[in-house]
Amino acid sequence: MTRLIGVGLLVAFTLSPVVVDAQQSGMPRIGYLGAGGPRADNPNTMAFRQGLRDLGWVEGQTVAIEYRWAEGHPERRRSWVEPTS
């Protein structure tokens, strides 16, 4: 479980330019890149949210989370994080 939280936070820090941009417009924003689909009971997503709560971040109150789902297509994730230039 701790490893999942660490991976989720690594993803969040990888997307730090998104967070910096969001801070200029108000609430900080974190991107979550999920391998599966948008299920409410996804253990990885639940661990990610719990890790954020443990650090004092509450979704919708102190931070906005933008979800992207690969839905079994790993090539989608690559296009989300590769530089476009």
Image: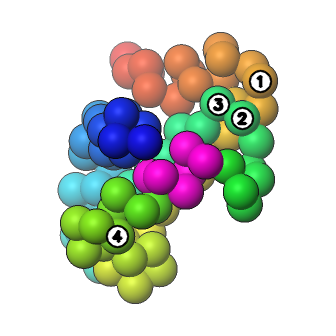
Marks 2,4: beta carbons within 8 A: no
**Residue 77 x %, y %:** 58, 25
Left or right side of 74 for 26: left
Q: Secondary structure at mark 4?
A: helix
Marks 2,3: beta carbons within 8 A: yes
Quadrant for the N terminus, please.
top left
**Eye-nearest disc, 2 or 4:** 4
**Eye-nearest disc, 4 or 1:** 4
**Residue 71 x %, y %:** 77, 32
Q: Could you tell me how far apart the alpha carbons at marks 2 and 1 are, in whole angstroms? A: 6 Å
Question: Looking at numbered disc 3 in the image, what kind of residue is underneath it?
Answer: Ala
- Eyeballing the image, is 12 above or below 61? above
> Magenta part mainly helix, strand or loop?
helix
- Residue 72's disc is 1
The magenta region covers: 43-48
Q: Could you tell me how far apart the alpha carbons at marks 2 and 4 are, in whole angstroms? A: 22 Å
- Quickly name the residue at label 4: 53
Q: Earlier in the sequence, mark 4 or mark 1?
A: 4
